[in-house]
Image (spheres, rainbow, N blue to C red):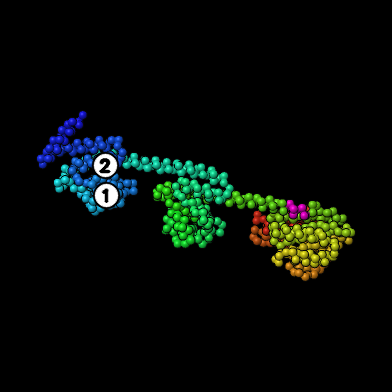
Amino acid sequence: MHLPVVFQYQRALDEFRREGREPPLLKRMSELISLLDLTTTLDSALPGEDILDAALLIVLGELQASRGVLLVRKPDGRFDFRASRGLPADAPRDLPAGSLPETALMAGETAPPPRALAALGLEVLCPVTKAGRVLAVIGLGPRAGGRGYGDEEMGFLRSVAACSATPIENGLIYQELQRVNQRLSVKVFQLRNLFDISRELTTSFEEDGIRGLVTTTLMGHLMVSRCSFFTREPGGSFVAHERGIPVDSAPFRLGPDEGRLVETLSPGPKPVAGLPDGPFRARLLATRMWVAVPLPIGGRVEGLFALGERASGRAFDEEDQDFVLTLGRQALAAIENVRLQRVRMEKLRQDRELQIAREIQQSLFPSSCPAVPGFDVAAASHPCYQVGGDLYDFIPLEGGRLALAVADVSGKGTPASILMASLHASLRALAGTSTPARLMERLNAFIFASTQANKYVTLFYAELDPASRRLLYVNAGHVPPFVFRAGGPHERLEAGGPVLGLLEDVAFEVGETSLASGDIVAVVTDGATEASSPEDVEFGDDRVLDALGVAGGREAEEVVTGLVAAVRGWAGPRGCSDDLTALVLRAL
């Protein structure tokens, strides 16, 4: 309803100005009309840039200024040229933070422009403040007719600033909400991509398939035409899976030395051109890579992405970096899971093979101890690992005689068990075919010819004649068996010769002993005598004799059980350090 009156006042003011006169009342009315137009413009539904441009035109028109600018503060402290009139085409688009006299501006005062704005022809600055914070700055150039900016013009500018403060603040809040919503939308999109790819990664069991899936996803998400994914291999090298690289480019691998260069890269994207000189940088430049993104996990670089330029030309921002790092860590975790699964499967296979080997080895031991007239016999073997290198056996001979053997192959585990099986077969084939001494010589020649130089066997071999209670024996480097006499001094069976397999030509001596009622012969391996306590004290020969003395009068099976229990109790929680075998022969 006020528009006709406004037009009348405006026409009258224009006539006075043409005549060189400007009555104060009409000037005040003109300023009020301009402020009304300004408020109406700021409250309109025009796009934000158009509102600010129209508001600046109203101010320029009222003050008859030749040029002007509206600077709006950005979140990082810089001032952006949001609207401008009459400025040169090469005028800057923003001002660095701290380039304006903010102390004066925050106090709500007008101030002369800094050098950068003065060079653009601006003469005065007026702040737009809210709650002690500078939201925007209005900059104006010289007025028409060479007139300056007096108190009345400054008062009008302050009124403009007061009217503009709330709309500009609301606009800034709206723009910030738009930025936040846009970032949230990007985050939601990224999270959906990461969720989808994580399901595919957990179902993939091939490392190369994981690398291919990740590089393809990354290229599609970031809109890049080339991508290389480097992952750490055992030994410190890095292998690359590449997409978008010319097919004539050979697969690229970083050796340990070049891999250590990658390990030294700090977190965050790195321009390829700024990487240290070397084959790695040369390769990336040759394949037109643009940025390298290390993937640190646990303080060490476990992988790296090399990316080409984006089709849009957009810079690599914080959201992109977060997506690349999250995707890369998921991929590295999936690759590690595949490797661990491969190790687990290999371990299961080895365990199964060891279990089969253990079953085969156990089948080589006698299924039961033989019944010998006038004697009680028992034996047991406990490998330190799944399979062991200890052996005991009972071999029936002609004339009712019985051969007893206890052997200990050097080493432990599978290699020792293989040699033990070979020795078992040879011993079974040769027992009783010649004298004990000649038997040992033939076994020595066989082991010397068929094993490595550092492999050997200790063997105690004896032939028992139950009728005469005589025991002929040969000790080839074995722990001397213990003879616990029921009513006399104890003794050790030491006659024999060196271990089997170390020397090519050796001779052996045959020993002999007679057993009276109650006598016990205990043949053990060094897993008993050398068993260590938690304080690293060996079980020793004396404790073996003590265990036999405590077991005196008991059956052979109880003697073996008691001896094994004594050794294990001595070793304590640390357990065995070698295979443990014991054979006991008790005269009834």
Q: Nearer the viewer, residue 98 or 380?
A: 98
Residue in view at x 30 percent, y 49 percent = 94
Residue in view at x 46 percent, y 46 percent = 221
Q: Amino acid at mark 2?
A: Asp
Residue 485, horizontal then vertical, whole percent: 81, 61
Magenta segment includes 134: no
Residue in view at x 47 percent, y 48 percent = 219
Residue 382, horizontal then vertical, whole percent: 72, 55
Q: Residue tagged by mark 1?
A: 89
What's the distance in space between the residues labelled 2 and 1, CA to CA?
16 Å
Task: Assign the N terminus to one quadrant of the image.
Answer: top left
Q: Residue tagged by mark 2?
A: 53
Q: Secondary structure at mark 1?
A: loop
Q: Earlier in the sequence, mark 2 or mark 1?
A: 2
Callout 2: few (<14), some (14-19), or many (20+) C-alpha neighbours within 10 Å? Answer: some
Callout 1: few (<14), some (14-19), or many (20+) C-alpha neighbours within 10 Å? Answer: few
Q: Amino acid at mark 1?
A: Ala
Report how many numbered discs are placed on residues in the image: 2
Q: Give the magenta part as a residue range.
A: 358-365
Secondary structure mainly formed by the magenta segment: helix
Q: Secondary structure at mark 2?
A: helix
Magenta segment includes 364: yes
